[in-house]
Image (spheres, grey):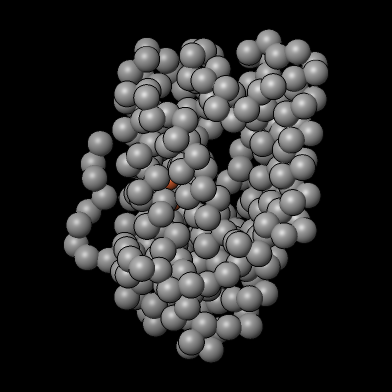
Amino acid sequence: MPTARTIFEEIFDNDEAFRLFCSIAASDEAQGGWENGRIAALVPGSYQALAPKIARHGADEDKHGRIFDALLRKRGLEPVAVPPDADYTMRLEAAGIGLAHSLLRGDGKLTELDIVSYLAHSRVTEQRASEQMRALRRYARNRGDIGRAVRMISDDEDNHLAYCHEELLSLAKAGHQEFIKRTLRATALAEIAVYRDVSTAVMAHLGRILGWSRAKSALLAAGIQVVYVYERLFGWRRMVSLRMPSRRNALGGLQPAHRL
Ligand SMILES: [Fe+2]
Ligand SMILES: [Fe+2]
């Protein structure tokens, strides 16, 4: 019976699978870095205090992209192109979640509601990132470089999530409560569907590389669907709650993102 742990063991042990896995992760992180960098540059005047935190958020994601890239190169591997069906960030954007890339490529300042949308989108996607990295942290614990890299990224993702909670709570207090609630709900429901589709696609690509039997692939696809049904019925609620984090101002201060 395959488990998350045995699947990750297979990925870590196979060059081609590891190459695809790290390429997808590096590309997601780099796209997140680009989005945050653009948002930081387009923050409206009334939200200037947020700009350094958004820039820091972007710098962290860029750093994560470089970390996955470095893991590949250390093993003598080159990144591969990410199959479009496995591209989480682009599929979220195509589903109309978060700020449109056409808007981010322009130079018009964002609106207040754009900033709220960005934070709601991040609240949901950082929850996913934080949970995934915590899981990966367990499975990669004994894998030397991979374990160390994942631990560092996981700490950052927890900070990003804390930052989103804190900033959204303060915007809710400033009168955006209804918009935040609506946007979080719509974002979470769209994200869990995109996550299911991307997970299914990634598993299919990995299954081909690793030579999985039809039965094993079918079992894993069914498992992904079960997670989706759970998230659609109950799990989505964990992505829309707002609670003041114990770590305040997680992206504040002057410390720059660690350079790799
Ligand atoms: Fe990240
Ligand atoms: Fe993040």
As drawn, 257 above or below 118: above
- Where the C terminus falls, by quadrant? top left
As drawn, 52 above or below 75: below
Q: Quadrant of residue 45?
A: bottom left
Count the marks. 0
Q: Residue at x 45, y 66 (%)?
A: 164
Q: Quadrant of residue 258?
A: top left
As drawn, 243 above or below 18: below
Judge whether residue 118 can be spotted in this image.
no
In this image, 44 relative to 91: left or right?
A: left
- Where the N terminus falls, by quadrant? top right
**Which is nearer the eye, 204 or 148?**
148
In this image, 108 relative to 40: left or right?
A: right
Q: Residue at x 58, y 46 (%)?
A: 89
Q: Residue at x 36, y 68 (%)?
A: 246
Q: Position of residue 40 (x, y in %)?
A: 39, 63
